[in-house]
Amino acid sequence: MQWYCHSLTRYQRLKTLEVRIGDLLLGDSHPIRVQTMTTTDTMDTLATVEQSIRCIEAGAELVRITAPSKKEAENLLNIRNELRKRGYKTPLVADIHFTPNAAEIAARIVEKVRVNPGNYIDKKKFEFIEYSDAEYNEEIDRIRERFTPLVKICKEYGTAMRIGTNHGSLSDRIMSRYGDTPMGMVESAMEFLRVARGESYHQIVLSMKSSNPQVMVQAYRLLIRRMDEEFGACYPLHLGVTEAGDGEDGRIKSAIGIGALLEDGVGDTIRVSLTEDPELEIPVCKDLVNRYQERAARAQQAALIRPVEKIPYSPFEYQRRRSRAISNIGDHHVPVVIADFMHAKSIVPEDLLPVGYRYDAANDKWNISDAAADFLYTGDKITDFPLPGTLKLICDHETWLRAGDSERQRSYPLYQGTDWLRHTERSGILNFLSLDTAGDAAAEILQQIRKDDTVVLCLWSSHPLAMPSIRRFMMELINQDIRCPVILAVESHEQTRDEQLIHFSTEAGALLLDGLGDGIWLMTGAGKAGHRRLNDWAFSILQATRTRISRTEYISCPSCGRTLFDLQETTARIRAVTHHLKGVKIAIMGCIVNGPGEMADADFGYVGSGPGKITLYKGKEVVKRGVDSAVAVEELIGLLKASDAWIEPVVTTKTVPS
């Protein structure tokens, strides 16, 4: 395999080994399977059974249940028997973290066990230890000795296994040698995989989960390359962004990470981790998978995208494409957001409120939010009122050509494809060029603009594989050293909100994760999604790809049987009082299994440590233990203040004259 998938330009599922999980076949050419995890107490048999049934009836093809200790592992038999008695044969997965004994019990009962190599044998103490090669090999021998019994049980009972690495729970040994890196995640899984292969056990699925989609995607790509180099084969891959959160932010973050891999044919089963009831995860999974059900057939019928001979950037690490700065676009500037008002019949100051601008008529001033659009596309119109100083106007070039001098000074033209070749009257400052990367004239236009320091490309594609088409075109920009800034123009014709959100997140997010794109422009037919929603989605996509931070980020785990408080209610309470802290990352974890490990990417942590008790973290350090949950949110605010991370909430952040 040349990279991490079979093709970057023609959709083809990654060839993986077949794994049997009960009666379910995974990997190889089998459909992408969807799954979820229960949130009930595993010792509450009936509650877990009822919730499992709701998940199954929603479409879950596997159901995972936490088994943190021997007693929960043993109770899996009661849960399994009750489900079978009611006629449900969906495979069950035992989720194991710290307790090998629980895994060995569960492996004799359910169809699959999941182990985390970061904490299955090692205990994470956040200690840095220098290992000599001999000492490191001794640790590997210790892993082999402790992990082999589980492998043998799985082999005997026909039980499948997921080796699930989490970015935030890498062992101290891995951290000491590889650091907090995607390569460390890969090596953590490979150590366990080599032990299993040594026992001729191959019923294995792997995952590389992170709350950061950028890290997650890079880790999966590295894992594929590593398996191919070492074994000449790839095991099935379970995709997921861990601790994605709730609501639209959780869906966007998951769609970016999972979708970026599915676009390249990578992934055999997915789980969308939301801080919501587990059955609500399944429709999101289905919307993601449905995008790729007919993708191979459509790709065969479509025109061939020019093959990639060499990727001109590393897909295993983030580096933004080099572009020149034009106004506030490109080079070192954060990616811009264009708000689409093409379908608006008229535009008045109040219409800008959904895209971050509130006009104070009494004082003739604009109040501007942190998530305010940078450009307004108005189509065949030019506003007849003064815009706030931070907002710039884009209109069709015919409209711009007809405009008077004063109107031209506050607007920039948009040219459509070959119109650029036919018209020579242009702005001396900034010109936008809408270009179909699958169009016949694209190559000719490139040569006309290669040295023009006023052109910003707005790239879209009429090809059924739009993202690969745009990515291939951007590779050509890099190869030819054409440094025009690029706006990712994505239009969705999907019908539902979730389908639109997934379309935008996948098409734009996959490119942004690879450093491709200097801005984002989201559109729906006749503006169906609404200006506020599209603006919010655009900023959420940039936030999730870590390319522009405009708000607080929440790393919130999905509830499970280990959860020690109401995660959904608590997340909402914390969000309500901290949502104004731009750039601060707050982790909200239900128990010690997910925190502090999964908080590795967070600035502050709120972690359940016992019934009604919370432990507060700053980074990886415990600040307060045993805080009563009734006052824990106030204590978190106190910690934010003591750490100089708190600002008092205000109605507006900036005020400028009109």
Image (cartoon, grey):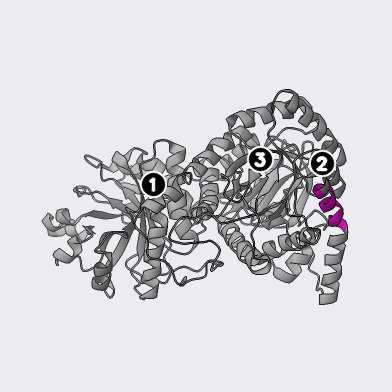
The residue indicated by pointer 2 is 106
Residue ID at (60%, 46%): 269
- Measured Cα–Cα span from mark 2 to mark 3: 18 Å
In percent of width and height, residue 191 lies at: 76, 63
Is residue 183 inside the magenta stretch?
no
Please state which amino acid type lies under the numbered disc 2: Ala
Say which of 290 and 491 sits in front.
Answer: 290
Residue extending farthest top: 86
Label 1's element? loop
Calculate the distance from the C-alpha at mark 1 to the C-alpha at mark 2.
52 Å
Local SS, label 3? strand
Q: Is residue 191 left or right of residue 167?
A: right
Q: Toward which corner of the image does residue 189 lie, by quadrant?
A: bottom right
Q: Position of residue 482 (x, y in %)?
A: 34, 73
Q: Give, as a single range, the part of the protein colored magenta.
A: 146-155
Q: Which element carries disc 2, helix, strand or loop?
A: helix
Give 269 or 533, whichever is nearer the viewer.
269
Residue at (64, 39) in percent of width and height: 36
Whichever of callouts 3 and 1 sits on the residue coming sooner in the sequence is 3
Q: Residue 90 appears in which quarter of the rendering?
A: top right
Camera-near label (3 vs 1) is: 3
Main SS of the magenta part reads: helix
The numbered mark, 2 or 3, whose residue comes first in the sequence reads: 3
Instruction: Give the x, y percent position of residue 110.
Output: 77, 39
Badge 3: residue crowd in 10 Å (few <14, some 14–19, many ≥20): some
Residue position for label 3: 24
The amino acid on which the numbered mark 3 sits, given as a three-letter code, is Leu
Magenta run includes residue 147: yes
> Residue 633 at what x, y percent from top left?
67, 41
Tell me the number on the disc at residue 356. Answer: 1
Separation of residues labelled 3 and 1 (CA atoms): 48 Å
